[in-house]
Amino acid sequence: MKAFLALLIVSLAPLAAAHASEAPKRTRPNILLIVADDLGYGDIGVHGGKAVPTPNFDKLAAAGVRCTNGYVSAPYCSPSRAGLLTGRYQTRFGHEFNPHVGPEDRLGLPLDQRTLADLLRTAGYATGLVGKWHLGFSKDHHPQSRGFDEFFGFLVGAHNYTLSKDARPTFASSLSQNLIYRDREVQKLDGFATDLFTDEAIRFMKGHQERPWFLYLAYNAVHTPLEISDKVKDRLPAEIKDPARRGYLALLLGLDDAVGRLLASLRESGVEKNTLIFFLSDNGGSGLSPFLAYNTANNRPLRGNKGQTLEGGIRVPFFVAWPGKLPAGKTYDPPVIALDIVPTACALADVKTPKSVEGVNLLPYLLGEKKEPPHDALCWRFGPQKAVRKGKWSLVDWRDFETKTSSGWQLFDLSNDISQEKDLAARHPEVVAELSRAWRHWNERNVAPLWHGSPTEDPTAPKTTPEKAPTP
């Protein structure tokens, strides 16, 4: 009998091995991170926007989870992106302001910080950046020195939309002269930037079918200059006469069209159900001060704008979609932050999340596996401005652009005052004490800014820098 069993085991072993080899392997998802620039919270349909239709933004929101309390780690372009790509508060490593003044080899995301692209590339992902970088201009700060296999876009904070091979750009930007690169080579292009970036994004996604990919698609829309594409000019509402608002809405229409093209491409390529999509803005819309790339954006019902630690500066549209994996049409109300994108992506890519990362993997929360909020509290520092979000409470010390004065600590109950109109600091001094103490404890781990001086300096003051071409 023992001999028979032994013979049976030997004879079945090849079948078991063959069955094991045919077992489906876990497929790591593609990761598409779409970032808009200075998008108004209240300008898209799913947030109540009615000036122009945004069906593709609304479709993306409905395809997954809309985080109703989604935040970025800074109310300004470059520091927000530094936090986004590292999963760390950028004030931990001195990237507090935009890198526009100082030695070129020092300006940008510090070289000892690892990006999400670094992490995913080591795990075998193809990595690409299309659009705006704004995290450094030198050779060592170039995207291809920071984890990206491919780069198509510009290095600085803003760019023209209407491009011509023969015309010099009219919208100047520090350390740029409006150069668009493919990898490290300057390109001369005809077209509209939003369309060109979408074309390139689709090319990248279709060109990497053999292994998982990570694409950071950082549009410059709807940042200034407020240029109108011929493709959308006839769709602008005739009743809106303000040229700046018409320009902004034209960029918004073009960006919505771009999102539609991306979703269609994923579907047609058959990878829609194996692609995790994040969509957010880098900060709130700039609808107030001409010193902050004023673009007429509408952040209502939120108060405040780009450059302020009020909700309108730091709370943004924030969608997460993964058809078949995440529930469709769901809203998630506990506060989340852009820092969470790095650990979420790492978990899906089977990459160990660095200990320095301060975000959390959102998937168990969005799937309902974890019931508690992802964060006990979230904190911000932007020059003299401060903020803490804990539960329903928002404690803010913000700066008024017009008077150049700080508000001092103000307390708001966001559960019934999303517009931050009623200061409750005098009524709840114990909450002010608790949250301000939490902010001070958090701030102990921050460092001084690497440029623009001390944390008490006004980061919104105009700066002047001679234009020069970067050396990527």
Image (cartoon, grey):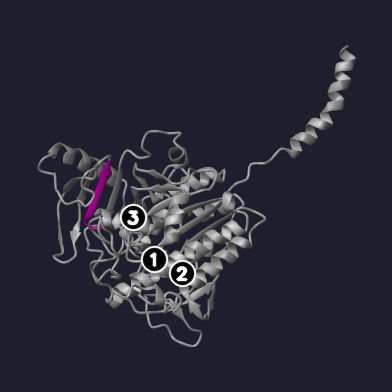
Residue 465 x %, y %: 32, 76
**Quadrant of res 55:** bottom left
Residue 237 at x, y percent in the picture:
33, 72
- The amino acid beneath tag 2 is Ser
Label 1 element class = loop
Q: Position of residue 104 (x, y in %)?
A: 40, 70
Q: Earlier in the sequence, mark 1 or mark 2?
A: 1
Q: Nearer the viewer, mark 3 or mark 2?
A: 3
Label annotation for residue 47: 3
Closer to the chain start, of discs 3 and 2, is: 3
Q: Is residue 389 magenta?
A: yes
Do we see residue 382 in this rendering?
A: no
Query: Which is closer to the viewer, label 1 or label 3?
Result: 3
Describe the element under mark 3 as helix, strand or loop: helix
What is the three-letter code of the residue carrying label 3? His
Instruction: Give the residues drawn in magenta, as a range.
Output: 382-390
Tell me: 211 left or right of 411: right
Disc 3 versus disc 2: distance between alpha carbons? 39 Å
**CB under 8 Å between discs 1 and 2:** yes
* Magenta segment includes 172: no
